[in-house]
Amino acid sequence: MKQIVITKYGDTDVLKIQESKDPKPSVGEVLIKVEAIGINFADILARKGLYPDAPKPPCVVGYEVSGTIESVGQDADSSKVGQSVLALTRFNGYSDKVCVSEKNVFNIPASLDFEKAAAIPVNYLTAYQLICVMGGLKKGESVLIHNAGGGVGLAALDIALHLEATIYGTSSAGKHSFLMERGLNHPIDYRNQDFLAGIMGLTGGKGVELVIDPIGGKNWKKSYRALRSTGRLGLFGVSTVTESTMGRIFQYIKLIAQMPWYNPLGLMNANKSVFGVNLGHMWNERNKISGWMQEILKGVEDGWVRPHVDRTFPFEQAGEAHAYIEARKNIGKIVLVTGEGMKHEKG
Ligand SMILES: NC(=O)c1ccc[n+]([C@@H]2O[C@H](COP(=O)([O-])OP(=O)(O)OC[C@H]3O[C@@H](n4cnc5c(N)ncnc54)[C@H](OP(=O)(O)O)[C@@H]3O)[C@@H](O)[C@H]2O)c1
């Protein structure tokens, strides 16, 4: 099999293709011949040595794939051989063959190709946990989705739209018209405008009931201030950490220094709450994940879950794919494809 290995921390040139023996499925596992691999921002953080959850290099990252089940291990359901599936992989996803527990594998709805299927697991599960499970967004409430043009952002938009909430979103200005076509009510160009002033202006000074924030650092302080009474703030990432040119240790120190500290009495008196989401730490909650995924896949069939693949890159061009995301060019998902004939440009 072929894998893309992070050989050491660094720029995109540390990503190298390596060949090794095909993996064999263990008890309860299936072997997937991979067609498409979802790229996540966490993979970029891992490559730069800014993602503590990732294995140390040399390592293979990748949280999600789609493909065909080629064989099954002992006690796994052999009738699944030949099925087209999407799967959660806790690392090792950047491979053309991968073994995963059959519990982390789901059939692909007929309307989705492999590329769109690989765009579903991490983005939609994270957004579902943020918006529905912990954020408790309801019809008639309002939500601010930071990084609305990213993979999780677009998934959150689909879900909030389905719940009939009023939706505010921050992104680069070039992404606004696309986001409005997808249903965003109020775009905010957070790179040229103070988003807090923007959201307060748009809501008549009230703020919103839910903010989901993957930016981190001082952004979290402002997001908290954007909440109205009964508001909930979901923290789920620290994208800002990649912006610093300082060494890794100093990047962490700066990030921690900028973080807010929430006072329980302050939360009580403000009628606000703050929660965190890390899907990678939900690995021991398979029943919950499986239930959320069933809802999401039903959403595909019902038409309100609309995974959007901005661009695919050939397997060999993982570095270019990372660079594309780091340059903020993507709207929605970037996917690596292993086979010929599946690549398409933007759209
Ligand atoms: N906790 C969890 O379970 C979980 C799960 C998935 C993702 N996440 C986090 O959620 C965030 C988004 O992930 P994603 O996979 O949806 O992202 P993505 O699709 O790769 O989003 C990339 C976009 O992020 C925006 N961005 C903001 N700060 C950036 C920066 N410093 N450098 C480059 N781009 C930046 C840019 O949009 P603009 O042009 O609009 O600025 C860029 O186009 C990341 O922080 C990620 O780690 C967390």
Image: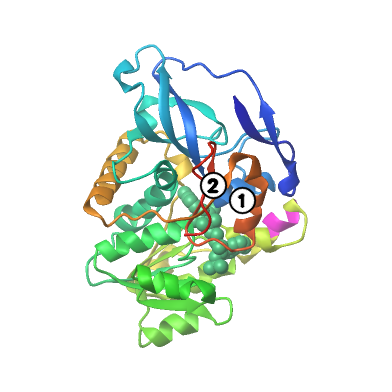
33, 28: nearer the viewer: 33
Query: What residue is drawn where x is 31% and y is 39%?
Result: 288
Horizontal placement of 142 versus 147: left or right? left
Q: Quadrant of ligand 1?
A: bottom right
Query: What residue is drawn where x is 31% and y is 18%?
Result: 77
As drawn, the residue found furthest toward the top would be 74
Quarter occupied by the N terminus: top right
Horizontal placement of 277 versus 242: left or right? left
Q: Which mark is residue 39?
A: 2
Query: Percent position (x, y) of residue 268?
Result: 36, 67
The secondary structure type at the circle numbered 2 is loop
Residue bearing the label numbered 1: 321
10 Å crowding of disc 2: few (<14), some (14-19), many (20+): many
Q: Which residues are magenta?
A: 249-253
Residue 215 visible? The answer is no
Q: Earlier in the sequence, mark 2 or mark 1?
A: 2
Residue 19 visible? The answer is yes
Residue labelled 2 has its Cβ within 8 Å of some atom of ligand 1 = yes
The secondary structure type at the circle numbered 1 is helix
Q: Are marks 2 and 1 in contact (CB under 8 Å)?
A: yes
